[in-house]
Image: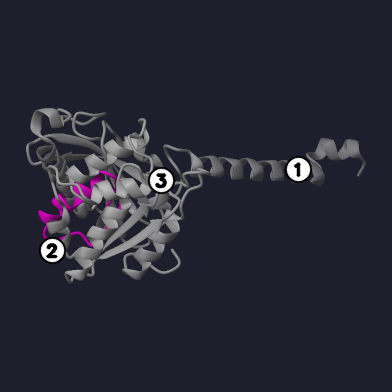
Amino acid sequence: MDPASRRAAGLDPLTRRSILLLGLGALGAAAFALTFHPSRPLYMRQKAVAVVSADGTILAATLSLPRWARHPAPAVVIVHGSGRLTRNEMVGDVRGLVKRGIGVLAYDKRGCGGSGGTYPQSRELGFESVLHLLAGDAEAAFARLREEEGVDPSRVGFFGASQAGWIIPLAAERLQPPPRFHVFLSGPAVSTGVEDFYSQLTGDGIRAARMTDPAAIRARVEGYAGSVGFDPAPLLRTLPVPTLWLLGGLDQSVPTFATVRVLESVRAGGSRAHTVVVYPEADHALRNAATGEDAPVWRDMTGWLERQGVLESGT
């Protein structure tokens, strides 16, 4: 059959093959776009959740679960660090967790984003009262997460950064049964008074430092005799929850050397719940302070969760 006859009869095989390949390419591109779209990645299914705190405040939240999980998944409540923060700041962590088979409940802080209530101010309530209030919100979110379909209630924990290191133990103390695990990123095991004093010396990584010599700073912090404020150490000694601490050696907000010392004391007192990983060149964001390269947080967290029996090996 000549070319004219083939065109009359329909598309020739070469043309049909080209169209098929183009169609498959388009489908692949669409799947890629869905997988990596920041608001609706293909590997994740999400739904809106309303969390009701003890005082009646309604917190706007999102539950994100692995789409193709064959069984109920382990899951975490993400607890914020300091500041007026919403779920929007947690997108990277949510995606990283769900990719590894871990469900996530993320919420807007009270008085922020879609949540009700008033954002708590320490100058009005006192810093320790603020921590207890935020711990109540985290507790309510955790209780809600345990009830969600698709979540394994025996493998639910907390995940949080910075200030969350104080809030999470306060929330966990109120929960029965206690959480299965905690993961802290740049969390302080020192008191609020010590952390504040250290931040004043270093500039907290955002202001001009009052001191720059690490040895001198360490000596000042170790000799601190001011107001203690909230001290998490007694809770850390008694809570049985396996906890992973991921810390930066060059953190200018949390004194890592002092946090490690507290955790060593807790361990010497008989607790075996705490695992500590220090990245010597990392800052508060757990990035190399010189190059900006991320510390291997995901690798170390995943391995630890596998050893705890929270994740299956090779997840």
Looking at the image, is 248 positioned above or below residue 60?
A: below
Q: Check residue 18 in the rendering and tell me which mark sits there, or answer none.
A: 1
Q: Quadrant of residue 238?
A: bottom left
Label 3: which secondary element:
loop
Q: Amino acid at mark 1?
A: Ser
Q: In front: 306, or 150?
A: 306
Q: Amino acid at mark 2?
A: Thr
Circles 2 and 1: CB atoms closer than 8 Å: no
| Distance between mark 1 and mark 3 Cα atoms | 52 Å
Pointer 2 local density, CA inside 10 Å: few below 14, some 14–19, many at least 20 = some
Q: Residue 213 in the image: x percent, y percent?
A: 38, 44
Circles 1 and 3: CB atoms closer than 8 Å: no
Label 2: which secondary element:
helix
Q: In front: 148, or 77?
A: 77
- Camera-side mark, 2 or 1: 2
| Distance between mark 2 and mark 1 Cα atoms | 67 Å
Residue at point 37%, 62% (across, down):
70
Q: Which residues are magenta?
A: 159-184
Quarter of the image with the C terminus is bottom left
Q: Residue 60 in the image: x percent, y percent?
A: 23, 35
Q: Residue 15 in the image: x percent, y percent?
A: 79, 41
Residue at point 15%, 41% (across, down):
131
- Camera-side mark, 1 or 3: 3
Pointer 1 local density, CA inside 10 Å: few below 14, some 14–19, many at least 20 = few
| Distance between mark 3 and mark 2 Cα atoms | 29 Å
- Residue at the disc numbered 2: 238
- Camera-side mark, 3 or 2: 3
- Residue at the disc numbered 3: 283
